[in-house]
Image (cartoon, rainbow, N blue to C red):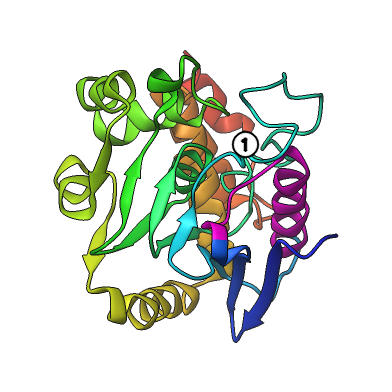
Amino acid sequence: MGDFVLSRVEGRVGWLVLNDPDRLNPVTFDRIREINAAAEAMSSRDDVHVVVITGAGRGFCAGADLSSSGTFLEEKSPPGSGSIIDGPGLWTLTAMRQPVIAMLNGAAVGYGFELALQADLRVSAAGARLGHPAAKLGTITDTGAATWLLPRLVGWGVAAEVLYTGSLYDASDALAMGLVNYVVPDDELTEFTTQLAETIAANSPWALRTTKGLLFRGLQEPARATVLDQFLKVNQGDPSYDPSSHYARFRG
């Protein structure tokens, strides 16, 4: 593993920090593979109940490193180099077992914007800016997170505006759109996010992980399948429970 992602655990909270602050933490395919590996390693830890991902310095992630070869604009992503890892989700952060908070300390642009969308919650500094300029660059979004997750987060019309215009939005606009959960003063961002993470981490890790899986699968499953899945999860520890008793009732 390289040195682009710094990992640490504080109590029950895991931290993933993108670490190229002088250039606002841009990514290459190699760096995305490093993000994936760090996320997978953190996801495997039972002592970590919630994860915070952020960037070092003044930015979250400025998107593709256009000064490097192997960027999204120059070549197709080779198999296994994108943001997908094994797990219950499709993208790096959705595939993590734990809930993930994206702490947006600055620009979240392009791939950085899509990475933030993969988190369960987003806390933004007042000075942060968010958006995806793909349309301005004559290309499309990098991972599919923007075209699948974004409309489910903010609605089709808002998602279309964000992607069609390629504009960058300040934190207050992002809050109004529903792109972020909270906007806090820049100098209070770490303290606020840490407190939020610790509040979540104090809850049952099984409940957190199971609820995350149900939420994500619920975006794709019909209602009956979701209800059945809920019954199975709630009763999976009861040896007398017969899941077949619910199939006839809830099958579509």
Residue 172: x, y in percent?
Answer: 16, 53
Is 235 left or right of 119, judged from the image as shown? right
Residue 224 versus residue 173: which sits nearer the camera? 173
Q: Residues within 10 Å of mark 1 (few under 14, many from 20)?
A: few
Residue 229: x, y in percent?
Answer: 54, 36
Give the farthest residue toward the bottom.
Answer: 11
Q: Secondary structure at mark 1?
A: loop
Give the farthest residue toward the front.
Answer: 67
Image quadrant of residue 18? Answer: bottom right
Amino acid type at circle 1 is Pro
The residue depicted at 45 percent of the width and 48 percent of the height is: 116
In the rendered picture of this protein, how many numbered marks are placed on residues? 1
Residue 115: x, y in percent?
Answer: 52, 45
Magenta-span inclusion, residue 30: yes
Q: Which residues are magenta?
A: 23-43
The residue depicted at 42 percent of the width and 31 percent of the height is: 149
Magenta-span inclusion, residue 247: no
- Height in image: 23 above or below 56? above
Residue 194: x, y in percent?
Answer: 42, 79
Residue 32 versus residue 153: which sits nearer the camera? 32
Quadrant for the N terminus, please.
bottom right
The residue depicted at 56 percent of the width and 25 percent of the height is: 247
The residue depicted at 37 percent of the width and 31 percent of the height is: 150
Residue corresponding to mark 1: 243
- Height in image: 35 above or below 110? below
Is 137 left or right of 242, judged from the image as shown? left
Main SS of residues in magenta? helix
